[in-house]
Amino acid sequence: MSRHSTDRPGREVTGPLDGVRVVEPAGIGPGPFAAMVLADLGADVVRVDRPGASPLGGDPAHDVTNRNKRSVVIDLKSPEGPRTVRALTARADILVEGDRPGVAERLGVGPEECLAVILALVYGRMYGWGRRGPLASLAGHDIGCIATAGALSMIGTPDGQPVPPVNLLGDYAGGSLHLTTGVLAALLTARATGRGQVVDAAIVDGTAHLTTMFWGMLAEGIWRDARGRTLLDGGCPSYGVHETADAGWMAVGALEPQFHAVFVSLLGLDTEDLPDRADPHNRPALRAEFTARFKMATRTEWTAALEGTDACVAPVLSLHEAAGHRRLAGRGTCTEAYGITQPAPTPRFSAIPGTLRLPPAVPGAHTPDLARDRDVPELLKDHR
């Protein structure tokens, strides 16, 4: 976990966001992941945990979304709690919160109170349904938001039920990554103008945003608003998964003609003997051919024959298998840090990379450390 030296004596650069300060009132799901992304890129993230057990239970020392952060425990319902958080915010560039609309205001740490303390603050809000709108006051979870945005209807087999893609699509792609994009864009503006702003990121908005390409395809008439019947959702035999002899799976993405030709050849089939794949009516027959062929060998055997070629085929791996796969290992996609196998910071930077500096923050572990910081010695003395 190397860090790069800087021209300041005794100081090492933590990543491209080195020097950016973030306050993160504790939450669950997309808010903590967004703050982790900022921390991975070098920001100093202070997580404000609340007294009591973790909202998700489990050992906080294994919550990897809290890596690279420092934690203090502050009771926001105590008389001094809100003042302490506002004082922490006074030294920050960004605040990221994910409570339901109105909660931060009731606790005295809403945008009006915090921007009064520091005008250039970027106040990032992570919601399911957004700050405004007919569903704004309701609890919003990944599955409901991706269902409402139309994305869940696209995932699954034609005759089966929609399949939730765990919470990757809504919470993290639609939520966290849109929030980080928003707060970093607002930070650029704040540094240019001296004025911060509120960034309202909603899972339902971000998930709808991810479907942009398909709205264009719908307008053009080349995308059917039905599950498992088009090129990219498993409706095409050359883009989907096929079971192997040992009940494993191979993922095929041989859409383009040149890749499809390699795929068919390495399967041991002759293109001339196959139905025309350009005709959708031939898809059942093509699927039957591919299914029968994949059933003739194990996943390991097909991987040896197809991986590393332009057939665009890969084995479907579990998380444990993925971590040890040669392609991921060769790039350092996953790493072992603080006794936990986990994804490394991403994306990659040629000059100043992100770093893994701290293990998952145990609530309150860094209160003494923060209390020693020169600009907050009095604020946390009662919380040590």
Image (tube, helix red, strand yellow):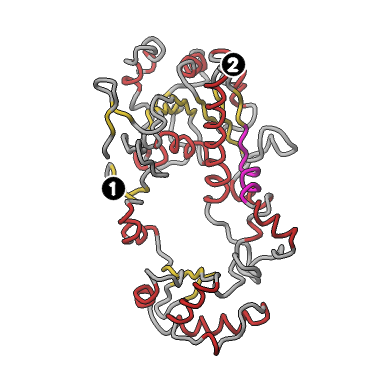
Pinpoint residue 72: horizontal percent, then vertical percent: 40, 24
The residue where tag 1 is placed is 336
**Crowd around label 2: few <14 · some 14–19 · many ≥20 (10 Å):** some
Q: Amino acid at mark 1?
A: Glu
Whether residue 285 is in magenta: the answer is no
Using the rendered view, name the quadrant where residue 218 is placed: bottom right
Q: Earlier in the sequence, mark 2 or mark 1?
A: 2
In percent of the image, x 66 and y 52: which residue is there? 147
Q: Amino acid at mark 2?
A: Glu
Along the line of sight, which residue is nearer the eye, 353 or 337? 353
Q: Can the viewer see residue 168 in this picture?
A: yes
Whether residue 209 is in magenta: the answer is yes
In percent of the image, x 41 and y 68: which residue is there? 315
The answer for how far apart the CA atoms under marks 2 and 1 are is 41 Å
In percent of the image, x 69 and y 59: which residue is there? 217
Pinpoint residue 41: horizontal percent, then vertical percent: 40, 35
Along the line of sight, which residue is nearer the eye, 245 or 93? 93
In this picture, residue 326 sits left or right of residue 81 = left
Q: As displayed, is residue 167 above or below residue 108?
A: below
Along the line of sight, which residue is nearer the eye, 382 or 151? 151
User: Which region of the structure is painted magenta?
Assistant: 200-210
